[in-house]
Amino acid sequence: MRGAIFLLFLFFSGHIFADNIIIAVVNNFAISSSLIETKALNRSSKQEKINTIYLHVNKILQLQKAKELNIEASENDINNALQVIAQNNNITIDQLHSYPEFLSLETEVSEKISILNLQRYITKHITIGEDEAINICSKKTSKTIKQIRIAQIIVTEVKAQKQNDQDIAIKAFLNKLSNHISKGASFKGLAKLHSQHSSYFNGGITDWIEVNNPTIKMLDSLNDSEVSEIYLTDLGFAIGIKLEERFISNNLKKCKEELIYLTAEKFYSSWVKELRDKAYIKIYHDAL
């Protein structure tokens, strides 16, 4: 039945890009020459015309998918976008409404928002691991920031004869632990037993810390397995060991965002191609 309907195309004659001449079919949607800029098609080679039609095909498929997933542009989204357009052109929204081609503009805004919603939906799982981002971004710039990861035992209070003796008692306890570690005891094991910080459960290991203050610089200077001197934290006195170090880009956040964008863009492009491969598409090459 579909083929019979579009055989009507063969009965048209005269200018090949006359209004409403069907030049392609996408699923259940017919593309007529009036939907595509006729002048652009007339100036183009046959291959360029086909490329232009495929761009339109891609748009239709994306809009169909957005409708299927119920993520089309809402009326509120469209109105907000039109308000921004009006403000950027220093006119009121009423003046924009009086624009002769306002309906075409409104449709274009709706389509772009719908496709953007689809892009976000399809690529929402895209991410870049921290180590991968650091590895790539650090190669892109010579400006780097040093970070270290440490394990620490933080003690807030211990039993003491007098409350005023707390600091002395805590330091004595930490010195005792430090001596045990120096003789071969497991730092992480003692952290699990005695650290009064929430990191005790994983042996006192911290996240990556930027080397940007005297205490962290002191910890950064430690040799392998060397226990630090006692230092003060926001939660109490502590001892620590240096576990590892790394150098990261000083613009890591921006670089990581760019990597995610490029990865998502590549993924979405492949997804649209797959969407097109699964669709019913008929282009009337003889009409071009």
Image: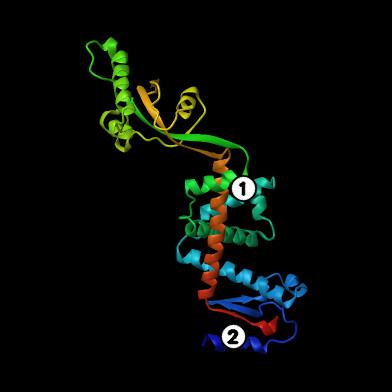
* Residue drawn at 39 percent across, 32 percent down: 225
Residue type, mark 2 in image: Phe
The circle on residue 6 is: 2
The circle on residue 84 is: 1
SS for dot 1: helix
* Label located before the other in sequence (1 or 2): 2
Which is more toward the observer, 222 or 255?
A: 222
Q: Are marks 1 and 2 in contact (CB under 8 Å)?
A: no
* Residue drawn at 65 percent across, 73 percent down: 53
Which is more toward the observer, 40 or 235?
A: 235
Point out the residue furthest to the front here. Answer: 183
On screen, residue 143 above or below 137:
above
On screen, residue 230 above or below 45:
above
Which is more toward the observer, 59 or 15?
A: 59
- CA gap between label 1 and label 2 equals 42 Å
* Residue drawn at 57 percent across, 45 percent down: 137
Residue type, mark 1 in image: Val
Q: Is residue 166 left or right of residue 207?
A: left
> Where does the C terminus fall, quadrant-wise?
bottom right
* Residue drawn at 28 percent across, 15 percent down: 169
- Where is residue 188? Give x, y as percent: 32, 34
The circle on residue 108 is: none
- Where is residue 70? Give x, y as percent: 45, 62
Q: Is residue 220 left or right of residue 58?
A: left
Give the crowd class for mark 1: few <14, some 14-19, many >=20 residues within 10 Å: few
The reply to whether residue 59 is in sight is yes
Q: How many marks?
A: 2
Q: Is residue 286 left or right of residue 69?
A: right
